[in-house]
């Protein structure tokens, strides 16, 4: 209420002067009835002057409101502007405090996830060593050992995916763009997925040249290719090949299998979206392709997904980064 009266004090003063004092002055000089239009002119003139002064004093606040920006008004003049500026400062202070708390919580979560994943990967490595050391001694248990190894590989993949998702929140801080040999990166991923290829009876066929060079981040690009190849194996038909080719600055990964419905292609890169095929398989988390999109967008590598006639192809364009490097 106090702020209201302070803000409207000029209007109250104008009203008192115009409709009480001014008529008395005119009446004393020559009669109000003889100068009515002069009274109207003076009253209108004083109103325009007041509006001009009020607009000038509140112009900064009107500009901020019109632009819909949450910024502090510098050097507020009117009482209303000063109150408005104080509220904005308190809101900004609260938001900064909440942002700091969120960053700290996010960092703590990343540390916890990273620590937990590494703690779980140690016994997994021990289990894999035990499998490798025993499967040749006990030939009768070879099939059972292989099943255990498969499940260990799946668990290891899930842990790596969780760790990658956690680290991707601070992706820009961990980039190192350099010239890399693309085929060597793909060959490393193929070797990592060797057992998965054999188990699913889907085999890689890489036809790119040895000297194919691109500018990117080796570690994060390997994460992308690992995810794309593992998806190609997971959703590919048995006794088929995953074709990997590089031409004119574009990497293409093609697999044969059920076509992705057209209405799902734009959504498969959304977080937690599994799609029809993911629900059928029952092992999809909806995280892998989201990570692919996030990493490729940060690396500035445009990509495209096409699916038709029982073939699914994803294309990654490195030509943009090659032009920047030149």
Image: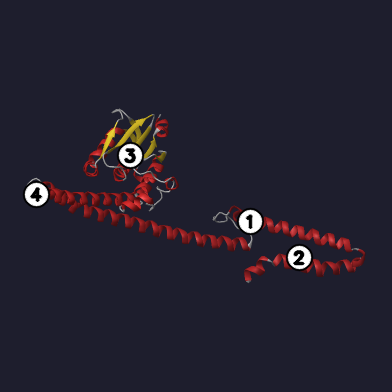
Q: Which residue is mark 2?
A: 14
Mark 2: few/some/many CA within 10 Å (<14, 14-19, 20+)? some
Q: Secondary structure at mark 2?
A: helix
Q: Quadrant of residue 2?
A: bottom right
Residue drawn 85% across and 63% down? 39
Q: Contact (CB < 8 A) between labels 3 and 1?
A: no
Eye-nearest disc, 2 or 1:
1
Q: Contact (CB < 8 A) between labels 2 and 3?
A: no
**Distance in Å between CA atoms under marks 3 and 1:** 58 Å
Mark 3: few/some/many CA within 10 Å (<14, 14-19, 20+)? many
Q: Which residue is mark 1?
A: 62
Residue drawn 31% across and 38% down? 218
Q: Which residue is mark 3?
A: 255
Q: Residue furthest bottom?
A: 1
Q: Which residue is mark 4?
A: 140
**Distance in Å between CA atoms under marks 2 and 4:** 103 Å
Q: Secondary structure at mark 3?
A: strand
Q: Earlier in the sequence, mark 2 or mark 1?
A: 2
**Distance in Å between CA atoms under marks 2 and 1:** 23 Å
Eye-nearest disc, 2 or 3:
3
**Closer to the camera, 283 or 50?**
283
Residue drawn 33% across and 39% down? 255
Mark 4: few/some/many CA within 10 Å (<14, 14-19, 20+)? few
Give the side of residue 132 with respect to residue 46, left or right.
left
| Quarter of the picture holding the C terminus | top left
**Distance in Å between CA atoms under marks 4 and 3:** 35 Å
Give the side of residue 47 with respect to residue 146, left or right.
right
Q: Earlier in the sequence, mark 2 or mark 4?
A: 2
Image coordinates for residue 319, horizontal then vertical, percent: 41, 32
* Above or below for 183 versus 268: above
Image coordinates for residue 247, horizontal then vertical, percent: 37, 29
């Amino acid at each position: 209420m106090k702020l209201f009266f302070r803000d409207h004090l000029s209007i109250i003063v104008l009203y008192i002067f115009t409709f009480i004092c001014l008529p008395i002055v005119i009446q004393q000089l020559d009669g109000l009835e003889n100068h009515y239009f002069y009274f109207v002119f003076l009253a209108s003139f004083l109103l325009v002057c007041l509006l001009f002064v009020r607009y000038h004093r509140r112009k900064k606040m009107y500009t901020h409101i019109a632009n819909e920006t949450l910024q502090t008004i510098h050097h507020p003049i009117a009482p209303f502007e000063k109150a408005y500026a104080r509220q904005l400062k308190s809101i900004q202070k609260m938001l900064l405090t909440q942002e700091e708390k969120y960053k700290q919580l996010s960092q703590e979560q990343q540390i916890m996830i990273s620590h937990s994943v590494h703690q779980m990967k140690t016994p997994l490595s021990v289990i894999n060593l035990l499998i490798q050391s025993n499967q040749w001694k006990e030939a009768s248990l070879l099939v059972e050992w292989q099943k255990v190894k498969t499940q260990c590989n799946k668990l290891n993949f899930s842990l790596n995916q969780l760790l990658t998702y956690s680290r991707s929140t601070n992706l820009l801080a961990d980039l190192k763009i350099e010239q890399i040999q693309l085929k060597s990166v793909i060959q490393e991923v193929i070797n990592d997925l060797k057992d998965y290829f054999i188990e699913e009876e889907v085999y890689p066929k890489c036809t790119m040249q040895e000297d194919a060079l691109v500018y990117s981040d080796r570690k994060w690009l390997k994460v992308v290719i690992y995810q794309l190849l593992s998806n190609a194996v997971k959703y590919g038909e048995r006794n088929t090949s995953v074709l990997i080719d590089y031409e004119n600055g574009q990497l293409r990964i093609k697999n044969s299998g059920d076509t992705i419905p057209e209405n799902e292609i734009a959504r498969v890169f959304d977080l937690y979206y599994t799609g029809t095929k993911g629900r059928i398989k029952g092992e999809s988390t909806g995280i892998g392709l989201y990570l692919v999109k996030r990493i490729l967008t940060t690396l500035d590598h445009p990509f495209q997904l096409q699916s038709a006639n029982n073939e699914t192809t994803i294309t990654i364009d490195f030509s943009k980064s090659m032009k920047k490097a030149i």
